[in-house]
Image (spheres, rainbow, N blue to C red):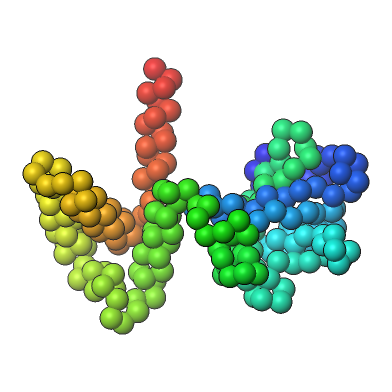
């Protein structure tokens, strides 16, 4: 079950002596950020405040992640596992999750390879909203959708040529350029990577069904 208002009665609290482990995952990239524990009070605080709050076993008190550093975890969804004794919290981190400065308590290299595309899509959305001076992406948005579409076309042709007559590194480089400019084009129309993924998922479901 995925929700931001999970019914505590669904959780098997006695199994863990009043505590349940909570895996925290980046809501966009799928990166596993950390593991903590909640009691019923921590769960209630998490749901009421919108910031992931744990029960600290060492301090024996409620602890909102980022209460000192400011690197809070904003709750996006909660999911309970099949046995009712573990939670998955999807959240948006405000900064490094780990006190050592890494994005995850498991290091910086635990995000799924394709997860960076979600980060890039979010950055493109930020550039679209803020239009920082001197940014290449800002320049594209200021040039308008026709200029952006032209760049997508140019990069598409260069990618196709690289696939036929150039080596793998050239193909990867041109493909990266194409994907970036496609994300800009989507954002200029108020769309994003998740919208494309939804279309692909729907198509896949139809084909599997048949």
In front here: 160 or 100? 100
Which residue occupies the extreme bottom position in the image?
133
Q: On the rendered image, what quadrant is the N terminus found in?
A: top right
Residue 130 sits in which quadrant?
bottom left
Residue 152 sits in which quadrant?
bottom left
Image height of 89 relative to 52, above or below: above
Q: On the rendered image, what quadrant is the C terminus found in?
A: top left
Residue placed at 85% from the left, 59% from the top?
57
In front here: 110 or 202? 110
Determine whether, in the image, residue 126 is placed left or right of residue 182. Answer: right
Q: How many marks?
A: 0
| Position in image of residue 197 (x %, y %) | 40, 43
Determine whether, in the image, residue 196 is placed left or right of residue 52. Answer: left
Q: Is residue 185 visible?
A: no
Residue placed at 39% from the left, 29% from the top?
204
Image height of 121 relative to 171, above or below: below
| Position in image of residue 168 (x %, y %) | 20, 46
Q: Is residue 150 visible?
A: yes
| Position in image of residue 62 (x %, y %) | 83, 65
Residue placed at 66% from the left, 76% from the top?
69
| Position in image of residue 23 (x %, y %) | 68, 50
Determine whether, in the image, residue 193 is placed left or right of residue 89. Answer: left
Residue placed at 70% from the left, 66% from the top?
65
């Amino acid at each position: 079950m995925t929700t931001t208002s999970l019914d505590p009665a669904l959780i098997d609290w006695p199994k863990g002596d009043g505590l349940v482990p909570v895996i925290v995952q980046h809501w966009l990239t799928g990166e596993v950020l950390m593991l903590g524990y909640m009691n019923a009070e921590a769960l209630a605080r998490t749901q009421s405040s919108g910031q992931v709050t744990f029960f600290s076993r060492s301090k024996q008190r409620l602890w909102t992640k980022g209460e000192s550093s400011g690197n809070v975890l904003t709750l996006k969804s909660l999911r309970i596992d099949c046995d009712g004794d573990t939670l998955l919290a999807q959240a948006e981190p405000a900064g490094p999750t780990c006190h050592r400065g890494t994005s995850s308590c498991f290091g910086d290299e635990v995000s799924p390879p394709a997860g960076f595309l979600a980060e890039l899509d979010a950055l493109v959305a930020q550039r679209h909203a803020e239009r920082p001076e001197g940014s290449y992406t800002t320049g594209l948005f200021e040039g308008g959708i026709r200029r952006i579409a032209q760049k997508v076309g140019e990069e598409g042709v260069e990618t196709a040529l690289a696939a036929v007559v150039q080596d793998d590194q050239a193909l990867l480089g041109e493909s990266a350029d194409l994907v970036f400019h496609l994300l800009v084009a989507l954002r200029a129309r108020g769309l994003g990577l998740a919208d494309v993924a939804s279309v692909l998922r729907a198509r896949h479901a139809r084909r599997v069904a048949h």
